[in-house]
Image (spheres, rainbow, N blue to C red):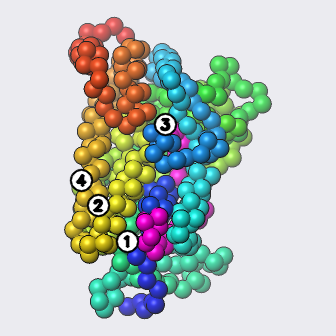
Amino acid sequence: MMQTGEIFDVVVIGGGPSGATAAHELARQGHSVLLLDRAGRIKPCGGAIPPRLIKDFAIPDELLVAKATSARMLSPSDNRVDIPIENGFVGMVDRDQFDEWLRERARMAGAERRTGVFERIERDTDGTAIVAYRPREGKAEGEVPVVGVRARRVVGADGARSEVARQTIAGAERTRYVFAYHEILRVPEQRPADYDGGRCDVYYRGTLSPDFYGWVFPHGNTLSVGTGSADKGFSLRNAVGALRQTAGLQNAEVLRREGAPLPMKPLPRWDNGRDVLLAGDAAGVVAPSSGEGIYYAMAAARMAAEAVHESLVTGDGKVLRQARKRFMGEHGRVFWVLGIMQRFWYANDRRRERFVKMCEDRDVQRLTFDSYMNKRLVRSEPMAHVRIFFKDMAHLLGLARV
């Protein structure tokens, strides 16, 4: 058993958007918080953040490296559907800068930052959790001894395939993953024909992903070009190379390459009923179909922080379950709908072709973007939903012309 004199109200493991947000929220409420993050790793991510995130989490404009005002969907036959983002924009961020800003905000609120690799959770003689980790001090990993701190509560925000979840949460292994890979490119001086630094391009083609999609997202002076798939035999790196060729970016300078698994379904349980709670990718809150994760990670973290705060105040570990209950109550229906969409429309190129064709419809565009921008299913236009229902049925039955 590891002995330690230090004790924190909360140890947050993982310093991505979810962990940094949870640490910030809890520190603001006066709790002693340790934010433990392993340095040097950036998650592959298109970097899109909707207006609701910018508003809810007070993201400053200077963190936005680009503002997307339109999206282009490209089908297997190269049918191109341009969708303007009416009355707004989607913010684009670079994750290395964005995540660090969130961690620093947590520190400014009172959280203590440390860099290290989580090892395990042990128990003190009184049952208090001891978070064991290996500090990063510029030495070889084996030369740095494992140290521990005591924690009244632990937030596991250590990403997909969370080690915290594996050790402490029953059923954590029961989730599906898409493996994502992207390359950050410098925008070439000789820009490709039809290049638009304010447009997000989404490619629905089996050659680029058999079950997901490929993307080219603007980041100001750089671009995120990537794809994803749950098929372990599919070469993501070759697909990104093909996507770069298709987009006219084959000669663009590669600044960095990143890959990671993305969970496609929330875990059935986020807490151990006592003192450990998951958030972000560790809890599985990446939206199916779209792969969007930043907003949902931060929203889940805020709910986790509220549950942890209540648990600390009342001494009741059972209230930790409220985080998942509240998240699924607010976003579960969206995840269910998007899961069905991904399983059906991404199944083959014939369906992808019909999916892109369906997105030419203005009702579909308007309601889809309103739902994305504001993170709610739109119910204010019942006749538009009726029209979309019949159009969807026509495409599902093959009655609509492609």
In which quadrant is the C terminus drawn? top left
Around disc 3, counting alpha carbons within 10 Å, would you say few (fewer than 14), some (14 to 19), or many (20 or more)?
some
Label 3 SS:
helix
Give the image location of residue 306, x and y in percent. 34, 60
Q: Nearer the viewer, mark 3 or mark 1?
A: 3
User: Disc 3 or 1, which lies upstream in sequence?
Assistant: 3
User: Disc 3 or 2, which lies upstream in sequence?
Assistant: 3
User: Disc 4 or 2, which lies upstream in sequence?
Assistant: 2
Q: Which residue position holds label 1?
A: 154
Q: Mark 4 and mark 2: span between their CA atoms?
A: 10 Å
Answer whether labels 4 and 2 touch (C-beta < 8 Å): no
Q: Mark 1 and mark 2: span between their CA atoms?
A: 12 Å
Q: Between residues 111 and 231, which one lies in front from this camera angle?
A: 111
Q: Does 386 sit left or right of 197 as displayed?
A: left
Write down the region rendered in magenta.
Answer: 26-49
Q: Which residue position holds label 3?
A: 51
Label 4 SS:
helix
Q: Which residue position holds label 4?
A: 325
Which label is found at residue 270? Answer: 2
Around disc 1, counting alpha carbons within 10 Å, would you say few (fewer than 14), some (14 to 19), or many (20 or more)?
many
Give the image location of residue 41, x and y in percent. 57, 59
Q: Between residues 95 and 236, which one lies in front from this camera angle?
A: 95
Residue located at (51% from left, 42% from top): 54
